[in-house]
Structures are given as structure tokens and as C-alpha cells.
Amino acid sequence: MLPPQLFHKILGVAFFVLPWCAQAVPPLDYNEMGDVVHQLEHRVSKLEEVLHLEKMITTSGEKVFATNGERADFDTAVKKCKEAGGSIASPRNPKENDAILYFVKKFNTYAYLGIKASLIPSKFQFLDGTPLTYTNWHSNEPSGKGEEACVEMYTDGTWNDKVCRKSRLIVCQF
Ligand code: MMA
Ligand code: CA
């Protein structure tokens, strides 16, 4: 904690320099704001191109899927994605499934999805409990009968229920 006298001093200085700050950064007019937005868009799209080149991101609609190329068990993958400000990749339609598949193929490694068995064994749902409206199970899957609570994506994009402690590619969504 800052001592009250020091806090007071800092506050005093802040208010003292405020008029100067306001002067040093004049307000932007409408056209200038447009320019700033344009420049930022340009920078962001260049960053996206680099990340795409490095096979670290791919987009589907509004969603951005990303990997750091690392592998982890299910709980660690969930944690890493959360720490990065996202969540573990959870495909809601064929296009999103394809976006995740892109990484699975590039890294030639299965990936865990943000899908888990519910209280009813062999019934699967998203991590927030919402039901699956789209599935892409491999033939004869899910097969675990309650013994395989997680779901991995194969290199053909189909899904397999699997134990959660394997090492799989970390793919997050943002
Ligand atoms: C493994 C395991 C299962 C999967 C079957 C498919 C033998 O178990 O990966 O999850 O359903 O293979 O043959
Ligand atoms: Ca299985």
C-alpha cells in the first residue's frame, strides 16, 4: 500500500500536469480517427498474416482458432487456453471443425476438443453444459461407455471419445 502522503503528492502532480497532457494530445477530428483506425486495421491484418504463416492461427467467421504447437492433457489444455484469454476449441459446425482440423493436419497430432461426457455416460456436451447441435463422430464412436470422458479429433476431422490424460495438440478459440 502507498502511504497516504505519497498518494496525495502523486495525485497533486497528476492534476498539475493534466492540462499539459490534454494539450500535448490534441483531440482527433473525424478524418484523423478514420486514418488511425485504418492504420490499426493494417497492422492487425499484417500480424494475422504472420501468425497464419507460422500456422498459429486460422479463422472461421468471427472465431479465431489458435495453437502454440504444444501438446498437453485435457485439463492442462483447458487451463492454457483460459490463461491466454480464450477457451479450448469447440467446433459448432463443419466450418469450425475444418478450422481445427487444419492444425491437426499441420502438426499431425490429434487435438482435444472442448467437449466432455455429461452425467449420463456416453452423452456428450460442451464444457459450459450446452448440448451438441453438431457432431462428427468417427464410425462406431463414442465407444467408451463412460470410461472415456474427453473427445479427440482424428487427422480426418472425425471425433473419438478418449481418456483425458493423453498428450494432445493444444488448440484454443478466441
Ligand atoms: C482405442 C481408443 C478408443 C477408440 C478405439 C477405436 C482400443 O481403444 O482410442 O477411444 O474408440 O481405439 O478402435
Ligand atoms: Ca472411443
Image (cartoon, helix red, strand yellow):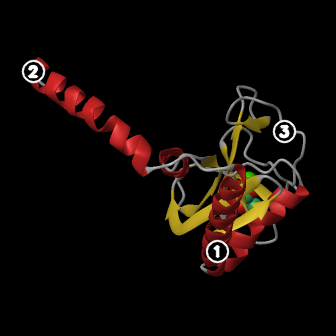
Characterize the local packing of mark 3: few (<14), some (14-19) or many (20 or more) Cα atoms within 10 angstroms: some
Q: Please identify, in this view, whether the residue under mark 1 or under mark 3 is nearer the observer.
A: 1
19 sits left or right of 12 in the view: right
101 sits left or right of 54 in the view: right
- Which tag, 2 or 1, sits closer to the chain's start? 2
Give me the C-alpha separation between circle 3 and circle 2: 58 Å
Residue type at mark 3: give it. Leu
Q: Secondary structure at mark 3?
A: loop
> Mark 2 highlights which residue?
5
- Which tag, 3 or 2, sits closer to the chain's start? 2
Report the label total. Answer: 3
Give the quarter the ligand 1 occupies: bottom right
Residue 12's spot in the image, x, y percent?
21, 27
> Mark 1 highlights which residue?
46
Give me the C-alpha separation between circle 1 and circle 3: 35 Å
Residue type at mark 1: give it. Lys
